[in-house]
Image: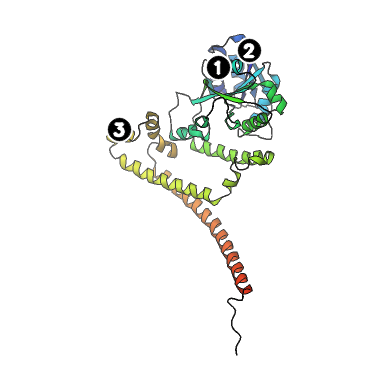
């Protein structure tokens, strides 16, 4: 067996069924060259039944289940059951291109004992949104930052689409199961493998499609988990503190950047409101603001993304304003206390220095 596709999953029965059918029935790679291992991380939906139904007549698909421990533990389960020399990781919300497996195999056959990162694109069935444009510029998948496809940094080792000879994972000790969420557990393993000498390459033709439209709330929640995971990553590898953004997160300028962002956003809302007076005419006017067709499509969706509907209701605006006031009040409370304490310390220190120099004392009477 040349390759094992490993898919960790949790409560995504519909999506994983679609992905498995693409892997079993529509790949150009010879069927005898690969198998599929599903590592179920304690799903409570119809995942077992869906997997059994899709793979009922195909011995290449094997299903294993564990108590909920997180994706790192699920991938370790998959690796332990893999028969292939190469393991190829993908997600339960990723729909593979028909050449997906073949391109990974070709990369390993041509380049030897390496890691391979494939490309992840948004599924064409999804409506492009501004958030999706933002994420594909590097926040979620940083393919645009890859300068040399023959020498890719460990930061790009995304388990939505990557493969590596199984011995590298085993020699590095597997995924660190202290990472309980889908945040940095793949990058951290890649860092350890690269320290042992692994070279990673990027192959754009090894393509899969992310079939999971992100929401603003979901993105912020996931990003917060990433922040927590970055501290765990830093404690395990202190030399990466700056690259993980630990120091930057502690600076007040980070919060100031947030306020600058929402100020620009409020201005953009006003521009959008003014351009919407005559909907039919101004839709074309809005599209004309972008030369990029993809950005034009995303521009039509941005108000719905922020407010949940094409036209924000008054109640939504009131709620947003209330939340902004609360954040502003909390920020001012924190910063004012800090500023007061800092000012008080500075004044006392200054007076002590001046008194030590004999400045500021009253003259003795004659």
How was the colour assigned to the protein in this rendering? rainbow
Residue 290's place in the image compared with 331, above or below, is above
The total number of labels drawn is 3
Q: CA distance from mark 3 to mark 2?
A: 51 Å
Separation of disc 2 and disc 1 at Cα? 19 Å
Tag 1 residue: 103
Q: Is residue 204 left or right of residue 85?
A: left
- Of labels 3 and 2, earlier in sequence is 2
| Percent x, y of residue 173 | 72, 28
User: Of label 2 and label 1, which has the lower sequence position?
Assistant: 2
* Residue that carries the numbered disc 2 in the rendered image: 60
Q: Residue at x 62, y 39 (%)?
A: 230
Kindly state the secondary structure of the residue where label 2 is placed: loop
Q: Are the residues at dot 3 and dot 1 in contact (C-beta closer than 8 Å)?
A: no
Mark 1 Cα within 10 Å, few/some/many (few <14, many 20+)? many
Q: Which residue is mark 3?
A: 284
Q: Nearer the viewer, mark 2 or mark 1?
A: 1
């Amino acid at each position: 067996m040349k390759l094992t596709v490993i898919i960790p999953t949790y409560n995504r029965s519909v999506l994983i069924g679609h992905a498995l059918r693409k892997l079993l029935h529509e790949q150009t790679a010879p069927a005898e060259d690969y198998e599929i291992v599903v590592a179920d991380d304690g799903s409570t939906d119809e995942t077992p039944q869906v997997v059994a139904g899709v793979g009922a007549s195909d011995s290449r698909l094997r299903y294993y289940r564990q108590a909920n421990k997180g994706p790192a533990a699920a991938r370790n389960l998959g690796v332990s059951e893999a028969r292939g020399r190469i393991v190829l990781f993908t997600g339960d919300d990723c729909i593979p291109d028909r050449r997906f497996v073949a391109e990974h195999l070709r990369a390993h056959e041509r380049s030897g004992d390496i890691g391979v990162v494939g490309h992840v694109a948004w599924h064409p069935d999804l409506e492009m949104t501004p958030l999706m444009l933002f994420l594909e510029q590097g926040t979620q998948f940083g393919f645009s930052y890859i300068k040399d496809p023959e020498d890719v940094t460990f930061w790009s080792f995304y388990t939505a689409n990557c493969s590596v000879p199984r011995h590298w994972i085993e020699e590095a000790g597997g995924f660190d199961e202290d990472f309980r969420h889908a945040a940095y557990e793949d990058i951290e393993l890649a860092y350890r493998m690269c320290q042992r000498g692994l070279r990673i390459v990027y192959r754009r033709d090894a393509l899969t499609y992310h079939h999971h439209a992100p929401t603003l709330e979901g993105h912020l929640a996931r990003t917060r988990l990433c922040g927590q995971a970055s501290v765990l990553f830093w404690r395990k590898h202190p030399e990466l503190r700056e690259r993980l953004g630990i120091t930057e997160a502690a600076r007040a300028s980070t919060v100031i950047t947030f306020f600058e962002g929402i100020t620009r956003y409020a201005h953009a809302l006003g521009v959008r409101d003014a351009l919407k007076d005559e909907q039919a005419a101004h839709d074309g006017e809005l599209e004309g603001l972008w030369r990029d067709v993809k950005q034009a499509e995303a521009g039509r969706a941005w108000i719905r993304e922020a407010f949940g509907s094409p036209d924000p209701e008054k109640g939504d605006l009131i709620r947003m304003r209330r939340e902004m006031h609360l954040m502003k009040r909390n920020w001012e409370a924190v910063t004012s206390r800090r500023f007061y304490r800092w000012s008080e310390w500075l004044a006392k220190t200054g007076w002590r220095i001046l008194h030590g120099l004999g400045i500021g004392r009253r003259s003795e009477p004659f």
